[in-house]
Image (cartoon, coloured by chain):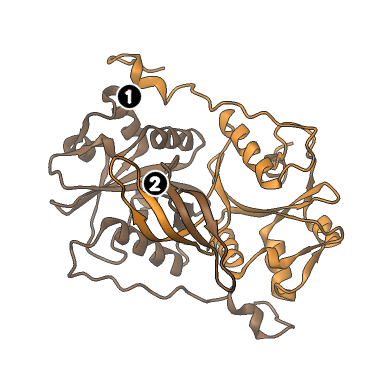
Chain colours: A orange, B brown
Amino acid sequence: MINYPNGIRRQRILENKKPAEKKVNFANRGMNFETEINASNDYYLSRKIAVVHKRPTPIQIVKVDYPKRSKAKITEAYFRQASTTDYSGVYQGKYLDFEAKESKQKTMFPMKNFHDHQLEHMDQVLRQGGISFVLLHFSALYETYFLDSKFLIDYYKEHGTNKSLPIKYIKRHGHQIEMSGIPRVPYLEVINKYYLGEK
Amino acid sequence: MINYPNGIRRQRILENKKPAEKKVNFANRGMNFETEINASNDYYLSRKIAVVHKRPTPIQIVKVDYPKRSKAKITEAYFRQASTTDYSGVYQGKYLDFEAKESKQKTMFPMKNFHDHQLEHMDQVLRQGGISFVLLHFSALYETYFLDSKFLIDYYKEHGTNKSLPIKYIKRHGHQIEMSGIPRVPYLEVINKYYLGEK
């Protein structure tokens, strides 16, 4: 591919160094949904399939100590409300943006899982031609759905955030994701099929 | 556009509510470069031109207090090194990803501004068809350049992070951005011209 006139040292990061493969524990069905999404993203990244990262939690830092000979220590800080969604990245040149949520409900998904700023952000992403969606995990049913944000926003405009999305609505407008293989939450299959027109 | 059967309350976020327009102070040439980028992104967002956000600083949280009747307070936390770049977003369906840095140097830009993980991330984004670049601001010259990450990575492979990018190299492979109008750092003009083939 490329010559490294100044020795092999420089190539250590840019070539072939795959992140360690994460092991997925199939036995542990109660595994936190967010952890499963993160593991799926690690898988996609390690296989050079997609580059999707979780955005760090926004924190308002108030006080920082700088002790001698040791690293800066934050001693007072507060959580801020996220103004965007949790995940963003790139897949085959396309911008992906999504939020992943789980609920113990069996027949509906509470809209209060999504706050106003997030819905506004999703709307902005859709208008800009990005692929915006939510991954909804019903932990009691062990069912996961991919729902385009368009339908979430439509429902919100109609009913507000006090209501819940009926599972019937999610099934009608969304796509179920089978969580039985590797990666555990293969959401890109939905994108391949319904957004990129494969197969 | 859409009817709001349940009253006007619901439309408050999704329609026409533009973020307050930021005032740009032309007098203050010493304005922090990051602040100027953020203001430019706010401008693009408010005009529905692009959706680009700064990723929050990644923090490792160690201790949190939950005082009664008041919000959670983080009492011990540490800065973590970012594994990606500072900015990401969507423009006309395309994934944008960039890092913005400034230097007081006049003839070169120190490579140590970019760490290994960031360069690896840029490489992953490029391979996935995203638009990855750096915005380099020479504060002493008051000159700003847009450089595709490809050229940053090429230079890194050749010279490592101990070296500095000569300004000649940046001028040859990059594009200067005039910082005289609104938004202050109109980096999308470069993308329109050289990536989307406008004009």
Q: Position of residue B152 (x, y in %)?
A: 31, 34
Task: Answer few, some or many: residues within 10 Å of disc 2's Cα (few below 14, many 20 plus, some between 14 and 19).
Answer: many
Res B166 visible: yes
The first of marks 1 and 2 along the sequence is 2
Q: Position of residue B138 (x, y in %)?
A: 19, 48
Res A95 visible: no
In the shown orientation, is residue A68 left or right of residue A29? Answer: left
- Residue occupying the point 49% across, 21% down: A16
Q: Position of residue A49 (x, y in %)?
A: 59, 33
A185 over A80 or under it: above or below? above
In the shown orientation, is residue B133 left or right of residue B24? Answer: right
- In the rendered image, residues at marks 1 and 2 fall on the same chain: yes
Q: Which secondary structure lies at badge 1?
A: helix
Q: Amino acid at mark 2?
A: Phe
Q: Amino acid at mark 1?
A: Lys
B19 over A66 or under it: above or below? below
Q: From mark 1 to mark 2, how far is it between C-alphas?
A: 19 Å
Which residue has dot 1 on it? B157
In the shown orientation, is residue A157 left or right of residue B135? Answer: right
Please, which residue is most extreme toward the bottom here? B7
Specify the quadrant that holds the N terminus of chain A.
Answer: top left
A2 over B6 or under it: above or below? above
- Residue occupying the point 55% across, 72% down: B70
Specify the quadrant that holds the C terminus of chain A.
Answer: top right
Which residue has dot 2 on it? B98
B48 over B144 or under it: above or below? below
Circle count? 2
Q: Position of residue A176 (x, y in %)?
A: 80, 47
